């Protein structure tokens, strides 16, 4: 990778930062003016209600429709949430300007220092999503990161951009426990890699096994532990690995309906984040464990629960599950009403999954 | 058998009450002290009410030996500014247990005499001390008595009597009794407090044994009109009452003594002359219309006896046998009983039978009951199956029961006359409640008069909300005939009606600061128990209470929604005052400015908008 390219990207990152700061400033200035002119300031927030969430086939993800809600400080029942939103913009501005990171929980507690009251964290989380919707940018862009950490391992060189570490380089295969995907990693420059594929895996235990079995070397891969449903920062990183480094992404989950959906969210996002783009890897491939694999590999299974079955029916009405393996596997799950864990392969030896299953699936992925 | 009967007959009223003092509320030192306070205070208020005097009642309770633990002897003194009691009546009024024998009905707090005498009796039993009564009817001379009750003879024993000059009219009664103020204190204080609420035209002072003073001044300057005594209503009558009324309606045969003969002579204008029998009869015939009833009776008797005054002096009338038309008399000269026949066609016969057999049914009804005119009386007689001219004196027991039953059942009587009731009135009630509770909202209502089984009643109610009222309401203050009802709340009809109300429908929620006052006035309050603390749920009374409460609740709801709006506006104004500065602060930094925007205009605008809404 040439230095020019890196410079380019740095510039891009700086621009992105500047865009956020500008957008925040614009909104602030508008409110300031309104107040000065004796007007009640207001925000237009894209509506995130179910009726306004539609599936866009072109970009293969859920997006918000045109409906928007006006949040006005004139309305006494909205005054409180308006103020909360203003405070969050103000707080996000400080974070971004000073290149400091925060988390959902940290935001909730920070509010108390400014006499802003949130009933509970879910109320402040909601306001954060409001600001995402207003700016149409994920919260990571204004330096609010998820609490939960997933991890990454593999031959990938990065260069930090966060204050105090600017220019510092790191290879992500130096530490066998993997590297936590936090703010510094998400914002780091991706310099170069010898890997040819990204393997996202649902579980920490299997992630460790993969590292031990040197899946990174054997299959020239970067291994990412999503820790269940992939956090936004992890999805951002997956997207960057795909878009910036040109790496294909495959997803390996438990053999159940929830596993299938973890893969789907990486591929095409969630309805919860319909107001955001740039979080999806439309080319990501789910390679297993499929419902059909259960039969094929004679995996030990457990019966599906009531809620598993209900979830199957729910997903059947989701437009993304109307074709291909997504529809096929969902139907099989519903038919057999049984499910299998990734660990089920242990029945045939601890390394069975890396020795037998994974190579087959990697091969298969090429044709998917 | 006969000896037992004799013994029973010897029990005097005071002995009877002494033996049954539990019934009258003198069961233990706590209850007795409270009951005694009530009896004396209520007598004082009744006395003033009846004479239209603004009551000024002073009550004090002092321990004889404050160091002793309760129960112990206390001196209870109640002093009023009422009409006082005439000196000659004092010993009887306070030294005997009186029978109340009034047939007239009117609303009063208590039956005069009974309760107070019970208190005196109880004091005497527990401490062996006399009652001290000071009374002045003219505001100049005061009679002071020290009395004991002779329980067995039901007679007062005057220990001391003296007079002195005073400047104020009124009555003061002081007794010594065993009591337990530690336990009764809070009830007595409640009683005084609640009494002064329902008598806002009275000044009531109470000095308690611990040196605390409670003073409730007169709030209103108008007395409620005094109740008038009226005749009973047919629906509210029983056999026993009819029997007692009949005794009054029958006339006794006058005792023919020298004084009587003298009176007859005088009325006939014969003081000097002595006429023969026929001469007397002629004279009587001429003057018949001017003669009084007893004189007519004597003349009628003489007409059958065919005697002049001299002969009349030598006999005694024994019996007038109406069915057999015979007149029996004792002849002193011959020392034997004799009889003469009476001619039923003679006008004198009618005079005598009328006297002996009492009034006709129609006269009895129209004269002795309220709201019965001659035509109603005749209709009723037909309904009950009696001849209208049936003499009351000729009724058998069975007929009396039939009469009583029919009086209850006959539906064409007009409803009872409420003029015997003395409700407090809406204005004094409202003033009293406002002064007492200092509420934000107060509304009162007096329902029209109604009646239950022949007894008229009126319900008055008030509702107060907010202000200085403590939360946890509704707090219910119940009154009957201006007496606060403090015990046995649970089973009371008022509580039933209040508890049946869904207050959230009237926008009253949570732990409301909220008071309800109810006052039931009636010639007879249908108490559930002897203790007279809770009113039975008579359908008619319940209905009036319910209608009254509904009316007041609707008013309260209107107020509450207004209050809610005002509170909301205030809340909103507070919200803006709180949040707009924050919005200004954040927008200033976001916009990269140093000076905050001028948002004060918005605050003012918001507040003026709210003012308009108010």
Image (cartoon, coloured by chain):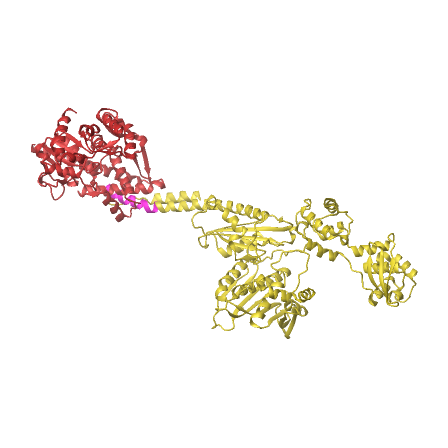
Left or right: B472 in relation to B529? left
Q: Which residues are magenta?
A: B576-593
Q: Nearer the viewer, residue B550 or B466?
A: B550
Residue at image point 75% right, 56% down? B249
Q: Nearer the viewer, residue B365 or B4?
A: B4
**From where the camera sits, is residue A82 visible?**
yes
Direction front: furthest residue: B1
Residue B261 image-quadrant placement: bottom right
x, y (%) of residue B10?
67, 67
Left or right: B212 in relation to B529? left
x, y (%) of residue A115?
29, 48
Colour of chain B, in one word, is: yellow
In the image, the chain rendered in red is: A
Judge whether A144 appears above or below B111 on screen: above
Name the image quarter holding the C terminus of chain B: top left
Q: Find out whether residue A227 is within the magenta segment.
A: no
């Amino acid at each position: 990778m040439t230095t020019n390219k890196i410079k380019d990207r740095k510039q891009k990152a700086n621009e992105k930062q500047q865009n956020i700061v500008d957008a925040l400033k614009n909104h602030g200035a508008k409110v300031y003016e309104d107040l000065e002119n004796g007007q009640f300031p207001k925000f237009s927030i894209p509506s995130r209600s179910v009726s306004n969430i539609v599936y866009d086939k072109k970009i293969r993800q859920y997006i918000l429709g045109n409906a928007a809600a006006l949040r006005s400080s004139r309305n006494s029942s909205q005054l409180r949430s308006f103020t909360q939103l203003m405070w969050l913009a103000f707080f996000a501005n400080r974070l971004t300007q000073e290149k400091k990171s925060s988390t959902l929980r940290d935001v909730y507690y920070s509010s108390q220092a400014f006499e802003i009251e949130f009933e509970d964290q879910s109320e402040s989380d909601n306001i954060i999503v409001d600001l995402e919707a207003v700016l149409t940018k994920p919260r990571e862009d204004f330096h609010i990161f998820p609490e939960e950490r997933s991890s990454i391992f593999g031959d990938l060189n990065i260069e930090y951009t966060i204050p105090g570490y600017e220019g510092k380089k790191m290879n992500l295969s130096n530490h066998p426990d993997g590297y936590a995907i936090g703010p510094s990693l998400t914002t780091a420059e991706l310099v170069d890699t010898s890997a040819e594929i990204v393997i996202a895996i649902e579980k920490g235990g299997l992630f460790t096994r993969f590292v031990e079995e040197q899946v990174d070397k054997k299959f020239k891969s970067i291994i990412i532990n999503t820790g269940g449903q992939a956090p936004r920062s992890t999805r951002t990183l997956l997207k960057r690995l795909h878009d910036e480094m040109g790496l294909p992404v495959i997803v390996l989950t438990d053999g159940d309906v929830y596993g299938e959906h973890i893969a789907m969210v990486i591929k095409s996002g969630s309805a919860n984040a319909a107001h955001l783009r740039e979080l999806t890897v439309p080319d990501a491939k789910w390679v297993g464990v499929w419902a059909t694999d259960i039969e094929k590999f004679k995996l030990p299974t457990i019966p599906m629960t009531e809620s598993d079955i209900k979830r199957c029916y729910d997903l059947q009405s989701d437009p993304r599950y109307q074709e291909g393996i997504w529809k096929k596997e969902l139907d099989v799950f519903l038919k057999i009403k049984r499910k299998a864990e990734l660990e089920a392969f242990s029945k045939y030896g601890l390394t069975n999954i890396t020795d037998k299953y994974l190579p087959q699936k990697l091969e298969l992925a090429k044709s998917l | 058998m006969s000896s037992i009967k004799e013994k029973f007959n010897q029990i005097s009223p005071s002995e009877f009450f002494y033996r049954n003092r539990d019934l009258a509320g003198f069961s233990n030192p706590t209850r007795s002290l409270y009951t005694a306070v009530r009896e004396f205070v209520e007598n004082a208020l009744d006395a003033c009410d009846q004479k239209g005097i603004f009551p000024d009642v002073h009550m004090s309770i002092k321990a004889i030996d404050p160091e002793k633990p309760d129960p112990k002897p206390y001196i209870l003194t109640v002093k009023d500014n009422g009409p006082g009691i005439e000196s000659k009546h004092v010993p009887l009024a306070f030294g005997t247990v009186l029978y109340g024998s009034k047939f007239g009905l009117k609303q009063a707090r208590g039956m005069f005499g009974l309760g107070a005498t019970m208190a005196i009796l109880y004091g005497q039993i527990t401490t062996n001390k006399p009652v001290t009564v000071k009374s002045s009817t003219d505001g100049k001379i005061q009679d002071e008595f020290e009395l004991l009750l002779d329980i067995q003879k039901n007679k007062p024993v005057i220990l001391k009597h003296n007079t002195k000059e005073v400047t104020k009219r009124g009555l003061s009664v002081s007794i010594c009794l065993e009591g337990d103020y530690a336990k009764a204190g809070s009830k007595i204080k409640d009683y005084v407090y609640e009494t002064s609420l329902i008598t806002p035209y009275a000044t009531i002072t109470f000095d308690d044994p611990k040196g605390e003073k409670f003073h409730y001044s007169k709030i209103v300057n108008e007395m409620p009109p005094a109740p008038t005594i009226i005749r009973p209503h047919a629906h509210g009558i029983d056999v026993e009452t009819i029997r007692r009324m009949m005794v009054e309606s029958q006339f006794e045969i006058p005792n023919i003594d020298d004084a009587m003969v003298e009176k007859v002579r005088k009325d006939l204008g014969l003081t000097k002359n002595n006429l023969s029998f026929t001469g007397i009869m002629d004279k009587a015939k001429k003057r018949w219309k001017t003669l009084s009833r007893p004189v007519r009776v004597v003349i009628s008797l003489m007409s059958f006896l065919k005697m002049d005054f001299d002969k009349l002096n030598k006999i005694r009338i024994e019996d007038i046998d109406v069915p057999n038309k015979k007149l029996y008399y004792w002849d002193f000269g011959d020392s034997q009983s004799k009889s003469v026949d009476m001619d039923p066609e003679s006008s004198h016969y009618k005079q005598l039978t009328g006297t002996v057999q009492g009034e006709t049914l129609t006269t009895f009804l129209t004269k002795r009951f309220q709201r019965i005119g001659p035509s109603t009386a005749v209709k009723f007689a037909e309904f009950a199956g009696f001849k209208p001219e049936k003499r009351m004196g000729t009724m058998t027991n069975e007929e009396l029961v039939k009469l009583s039953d029919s009086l209850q059942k006959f539906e064409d009587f007009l409803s009872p006359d409420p003029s015997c009731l003395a409700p407090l009135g809406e204005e004094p009630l409202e003033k009293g409640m406002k002064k007492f509770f200092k509420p934000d909202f107060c509304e009162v209502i007096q329902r029209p008069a109604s009646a239950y089984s022949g007894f008229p009643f009126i319900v008055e109610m008030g509702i107060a909300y907010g202000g200085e009222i403590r939360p946890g309401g509704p707090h219910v203050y119940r009154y009957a005939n201006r007496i606060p009802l403090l015990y046995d709340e649970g089973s009371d009809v008022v509580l039933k009606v209040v508890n049946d109300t869904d207050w959230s429908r009237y926008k009253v929620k949570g732990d409301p600061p909220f008071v309800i006052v109810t006052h039931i006035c009636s010639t007879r309050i249908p108490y559930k128990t002897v203790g007279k603390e809770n009113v039975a749920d008579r359908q008619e009374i319940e209905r009036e209470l319910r209608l009254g409460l509904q009316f007041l609740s609707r008013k309260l709801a209107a107020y509450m929604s207004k209050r809610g709006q005002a509170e909301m506006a205030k809340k909103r104004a507070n919200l803006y005052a709180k949040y707009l500065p924050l919005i200004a602060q954040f927008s200033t930094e976001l916009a990269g400015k140093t000076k905050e925007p001028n948002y004060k205009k918005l605050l003012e605008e918001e507040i003026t908008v709210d003012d308009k809404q108010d």
